[in-house]
Every structure is written in C-alpha cells, then in structure tokens.
Image (cartoon, grey):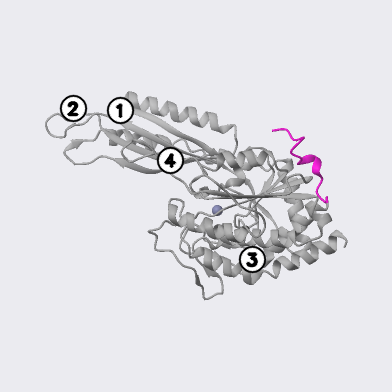
C-alpha cells in the first residue's frame, strides 16, 4: 500500500476513535489530578498506564521532590507524582518524542471537579483541553499508527513521556525531558492549540520563578520600634523595584505575585517572603535580569537593614522560532493542509514543556492537542469535534515522518549541534 493511502486510511482510523476519546476525556476530567494532589495523580497515572499499556509496557519513573521556600522562609521538599514512559522501536531511523502532562491547575479543594456540557455543545471540565483531551488524541493517533503496515512502522520509533508536574514548571521532570530530547529527532507536545481555531504556538517566551526572603529584626512597635528592621517595608520596596524591571518593549515582564510575612500589629515584622515570575523573549536577557535583581537585593539590604536572599531560577528558557522550528511548523501546516486544516502560528508569552525540549536541542511543535479555551479557569472548554480532527493530524504527521517526507538532515539527533 503506498504511504499516501496508508496515511489516509490510518488518519481515518484515528478519527473513528472519537467515541473512545470522548469517553476518556469525560472519565479523566473527573479524576482530580492537581499538581500537588498526590493521591489523585496516582489514580490518574494508574488509569493512563492501563490505557497506554495497550501499546507497550509502561515504565513508572520517580521524580526528585520539588524544593520550595515556605511562608516561614524555610526551604522544604514537596513530593511529586510519577512520570510514565513507553518506548517503541528505539532502533528505528526516526525517533519521535510525544509529550503530555497529566496534572492540572485545579487542586483537590477546588470547586471545579467534574465535566459538564455547555449549551453550545462544548465540553466544560477540569483539564478537558489542558491537557487530558490531548492525551486521548495522542493515544488514538499512536493506536492508529501502530495498526499500520510493518514496513512503514519500521522507519519510526517513538517514546511517550507523561509528566505530573508541568503546571508547576516541571521541576521534577525537567531532567527527564532534557534526556529524552537528546535521543529524539522531533518532539510532538499535546498542549491545546494557541487559539480555539487551531492556531499553533510559534515562539514562546522563557519563564523563571523566584523568591526573595527578607529577614529583618523584630521589636516592640511601641516601646522600641527604632531597634526593629521591618521586613514588610523592605518587601514593599522590593516589590516596587521588581515591577520597575519590566521592559515591555524588550519583551520582559516581571510579575510580583505573592507576599508572605508579618504577624501581630504591635510587632515590627522580621520576615517577609516575596514571590515573582519573570518572562523573557531572548535567552540572552536572562543574565542581565538576574544581575538587576541581585543589585536590587543589595540595595534593599542597604536601605532597610534587612537581608534579601534570592532563590529560584529560569526553569523554562525562551523558545525562539528558529530555522528548524520554522521548518517543522511548515511541515505540520503542510500536513494540516492535506486534511483541509489551516494551521497558523502565533507567538505567545505562555510556556510549556516545549520550551524545555527546545532548550535541550529538540525541535518540537507543542500545541498539537485539542482545540478549546479558557484554560486555567472554571470555564475551560473542549471543542469536542477537535478530538477526531487532531487525532487525524497527529496520525498523518507520524505517517509522513515514517515515510521520509521531512528532510532529516536538519533534525537528526546524531548530527545536530546544541
Ligand atoms: Zn498544559
């Protein structure tokens, strides 16, 4: 059977899995898998291991705990869920990495726990778009591809990596993502489309999460306030200084997000913890921004007599739309065109595991999941027909890669430079 015919047949087969995909999304959305809900993550991992286990044995990988500074300024470790990995034909010429996270931003105590139908026929539910719908699409595409001709399959091996910590910046799975990036040629990440019309994300900004711990000196607010060093006042000064580091024209944003500290009103507070997020357009901006924050910490110490200790880092480097990314995007858009889909590209300030893979040298398209929207809100929705549409697209991509329709020289793991 010619590859073009196989491509059409297998894409149809993937699309025919629409009822299976919808049933999976309904079931998976109802399992709370907030990034910090270990019990829910374990349940979700169990269900996913069962579903993906039809394709290949599923490995469960323990992740190192996340390091966090508490509201009391003390560094603690927070355990994470397990990552799941499946590998098929690691000896094949093309090696494709398929990535999706199974955690959501909705914790166990969130009011948003169950899927329900909207009046317009879209499905509202936790994770239906971000990213459980994408997991159903990934599975249907792989099942269709694996049902194809042996000669086609022999040209393409794949690894699936499902992680439980993407929504908190992939602190535990980052080393795994980097290691897998090095052994693959192309990455497919099943985050929802950038816009409900199916637009793919182009360049992505980089992101870093930081904490400044301010330590002053406690004193009685009435008797000897002059002996105190007010950490709350220092924190307020620090926050204003951080906000002033934003440079929208250069694509730099700084978001002071949370302040912990203080206590009784008759005590000069000796502790405050400031948390903030930074987004950058270019990898080269990281060093300058970091130096500016360190300078600010020194100035705060000088002005307020409080120590200001910076922790954290840039967890997701910027993902510029370079030549390889462009070539891969063109290939995906061309594949979409064969299916009657117009797939535009739009740059975004949002970040995902696609940033990590790109930073580790792996070209990847990271919005191959479902069409939907309002993610990270109780209005999150899935456009249900996009399950079949995106499964068709992903299958067709796998078939075209296996058939050698993408020039491998740009992407090959053996030859590419970091
Ligand atoms: Zn996501």
Q: What element carries label 2?
A: helix
Q: Closer to the N terminus: mark 3 or mark 2? A: 2
Q: Nearer the viewer, residue 262 or 133?
A: 133
Name the residue tied to disc 1.
Answer: 306
CA distance for labels 3 and 4: 36 Å
Nearer mark to the viewer, of 1 and 2? 1
Name the residue tied to disc 4.
Answer: 276
Point out the image quarter for the C terminus: top right
Tag on residue 224? Answer: none
CA distance for labels 4 and 2: 30 Å
Asked whether residue 319 appears in the rendered view, the answer is no
Asked whether residue 336 appears in the rendered view, the answer is yes
Name the residue tied to disc 3.
Answer: 387
Residue at horizontal 71%, vertical 44%? 325
Q: Closer to the N terminus: mark 4 or mark 1? A: 4
Tag on residue 226? Answer: 2
Point out the image quarter for the N terminus: bottom right
Q: Is residue 376 above or below residue 279?
A: below
Q: Is mark 1 on a helix, strand or loop?
A: loop
Q: Give the residues in magenta.
A: 404-418
Task: Give yes or no for contact between labels 3 and 2 (Cβ–Cβ under 8 Å).
Answer: no
Crowdedness near tag 2: few (<14), some (14–19) or many (≥20) residues, C-alpha within 10 Å: few
**Residue 374 located left or right of residue 146:** left
Crowdedness near tag 1: few (<14), some (14–19) or many (≥20) residues, C-alpha within 10 Å: many
Q: Is residue 287 above or below residue 6?
A: above
Crowdedness near tag 3: few (<14), some (14–19) or many (≥20) residues, C-alpha within 10 Å: many
CA distance for labels 1 and 3: 54 Å
């Amino acid at each position: 059977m010619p590859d073009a015919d196989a491509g059409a047949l297998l894409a149809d087969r993937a699309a025919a899995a629409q009822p299976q995909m919808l049933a999976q999304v309904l079931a998976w959305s109802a399992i709370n898998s907030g990034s910090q809900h270990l019990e829910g993550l374990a349940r979700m991992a169990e269900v996913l291991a069962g579903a993906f286990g039809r394709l290949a044995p599923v490995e469960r990988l323990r992740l190192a705990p996340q390091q966090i500074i508490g509201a009391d300024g003390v560094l603690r470790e927070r355990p994470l869920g397990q990552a799941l990995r499946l590998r098929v034909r690691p000896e094949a010429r093309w090696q494709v990495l398929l990535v999706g996270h199974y955690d959501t931003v909705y914790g166990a105590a969130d009011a948003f726990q169950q899927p329900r139908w909207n009046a317009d026929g879209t499905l509202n539910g936790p994770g239906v778009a971000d990213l459980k719908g994408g997991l159903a699409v990934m599975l249907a595409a792989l099942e269709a591809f694996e049902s194809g001709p042996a000669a086609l399959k022999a040209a393409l091996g794949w690894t699936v990596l499902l992680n439980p910590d993407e929504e908190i910046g992939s602190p535990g799975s980052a080393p795994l993502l980097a290691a897998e990036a090095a052994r693959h040629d192309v990455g497919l990440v099943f985050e929802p489309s950038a816009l409900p019309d199916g637009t793919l994300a182009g360049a992505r900004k980089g992101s870093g999460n930081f904490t400044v711990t301010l330590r002053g000196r406690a004193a009685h607010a009435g008797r000897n306030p002059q002996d105190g060093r007010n950490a709350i006042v220092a924190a307020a000064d620090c926050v204003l200084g951080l906000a002033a580091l934003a440079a929208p024209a250069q694509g730099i944003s700084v978001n002071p997000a949370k302040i912990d500290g203080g206590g009784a009103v008759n005590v000069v507070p000796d502790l405050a913890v400031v948390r903030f997020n930074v987004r950058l357009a270019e990898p080269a901006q990281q060093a300058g921004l970091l130096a500016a924050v360190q300078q600010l910490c020194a100035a705060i110490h000088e002005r307020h007599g409080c120590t200001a200790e910076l922790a954290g880092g840039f967890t997701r480097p910027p993902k510029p739309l370079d030549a390889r990314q462009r070539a891969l995007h063109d290939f995906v858009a061309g594949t979409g065109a064969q299916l009657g889909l117009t797939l535009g590209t739009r740059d975004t300030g949002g970040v995902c595991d696609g940033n990590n893979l790109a930073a580790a040298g792996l070209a990847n398209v990271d919005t191959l999941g479902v069409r939907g929207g309002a993610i990270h809100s109780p209005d999150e929705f899935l456009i249900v027909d996009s399950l079949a549409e995106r499964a068709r697209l992903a299958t067709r991509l796998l078939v075209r890669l296996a058939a050698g329709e993408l020039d491998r020289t740009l992407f090959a793991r053996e030859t590419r430079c970091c």
